[in-house]
Amino acid sequence: MTEQQILDLLGSNLIWILLAILIFTVIFKGIQIVPQSEQYVVERFGRLRAVLGPGINFIVPFLDVVRHKVSILERQLPNASQDAITRDNVLVEVETSVFYRITQPEKTVYRIRDADAAIATTVAGIVRAEIGKMDLDDVQANRSALISTIKDAVEDAVDNWGIEVTRAELLDVNLDEATRAAMLQQLNAERARRAQVTEAEGKKRAVELEADGELYAAEQTAKARRIQAEAEAYATGVVAQAIADNGLEAAQYQVALKQVEALNALGNSASSQTVLVPAQALEAFGNAFNMLKGRS
């Protein structure tokens, strides 16, 4: 084989090799395999051409260029602290944390340069604005509602950047030392006031119970007297009925009976040695005795 033939053969093989390399390069450039956690932003002559999702994608080699590879995983901004003033003029230091993910990469890469810094600035402004509408007690008591409000406000602000805020956290609300000392003093004063109120209520309850006891005793005494009066009235009624039925004789009998009982009690008295009885009493006693004898 002559030298010329060898050169022709080498030239022909080189062309095929170069052609194979070109075909391989075209195929390699035209096929883009995108991971599940990313999206690719493709440009053609400097303009947005397409956004490639996960899997195998085809582009025009040498014309289309993958300009941005954007992760669509959820991200967390570094914890940030900012000062805010409540509606009742209390300075607080608020620590926040925000989680987000990119849903539209074409907006994120072309509308905002530093998404993390932009979101952090937005969160700081919204936190100051929302806390400025609330008193300190409301900030402490309604933390969950405040977090929800901040999340919604941040979502509205970053929507044009193709970003979705998945979660916002209000990690801590710190007070300066002067405010903390004043609140502690107020808390102690409130505890003392509650203790005094409790003691006063206890004394009041004791007085009420004592008054209830006295009232109950008075009611029972009145009830006993009422029963006694009813018994006496009943006895008087019986005597009156007897007088009405038997006339004067029954009345005299009752009087004579009482006189005999009185003289008997006087005679049985331990302190009495001698009993002086008036003549009228002896006569009454004799009449009573005769009447009792006649009754028996």
Image: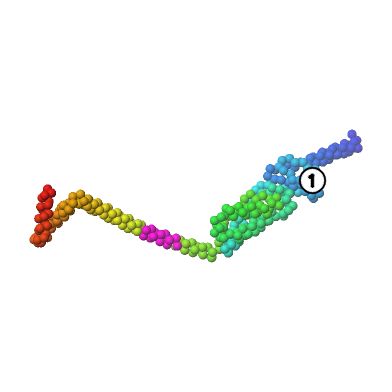
Q: Picture coordinates of residue 96 (x, y %)?
A: 60, 55
Comparing 232 with 266, the one in front is: 232
Q: Is residue 204 magenta?
A: yes
Task: Determine the image quadrant of residue 132.
Answer: bottom right
Q: Which residues are magenta?
A: 193-208
Q: Picture coordinates of residue 9 (x, y %)?
A: 87, 36
The answer to whether any part of residue 30 appears in the image is yes
Colour style of the rendered protein structure: rainbow
Q: Is residue 73 magenta?
A: no
Work out which quarter of the rendered image holds the N terminus and state it: top right
Type of amino acid at the residue the image marks with label 1 = Asp
Q: Is residue 112 left or right of residue 231?
A: right
Q: Picture coordinates of residue 191 (x, y %)?
A: 46, 61
Q: Is residue 136 above or below residue 247?
A: below
Q: Is residue 80 left or right of residue 275?
A: right
Q: Is residue 29 left or right of residue 77?
A: right
The answer to whether any part of residue 76 appears in the image is no
The residue lying at 74 percent from left, 47 percent from top is 41
The residue that mark 1 highlights is: 64
Q: Residue furthest left?
A: 274
Task: Determine the image quadrant of residue 140.
Answer: bottom right
Q: Is residue 18 above or below residue 170?
A: above
Q: Is residue 94 above or below residue 9?
A: below
The residue lying at 87 percent from left, 37 percent from top is 12
The residue lying at 48 percent from left, 61 percent from top is 187
Q: Is residue 210 left or right of residue 146?
A: left
The residue lying at 65 percent from left, 54 percent from top is 153
Comparing 284 with 224, the one in front is: 284
Comparing 119 with 22, the one in front is: 119
Task: Label 1: state its secondary structure.
Answer: strand
Q: Is residue 211 above or below residue 165?
A: below
* SS majority, magenta: helix
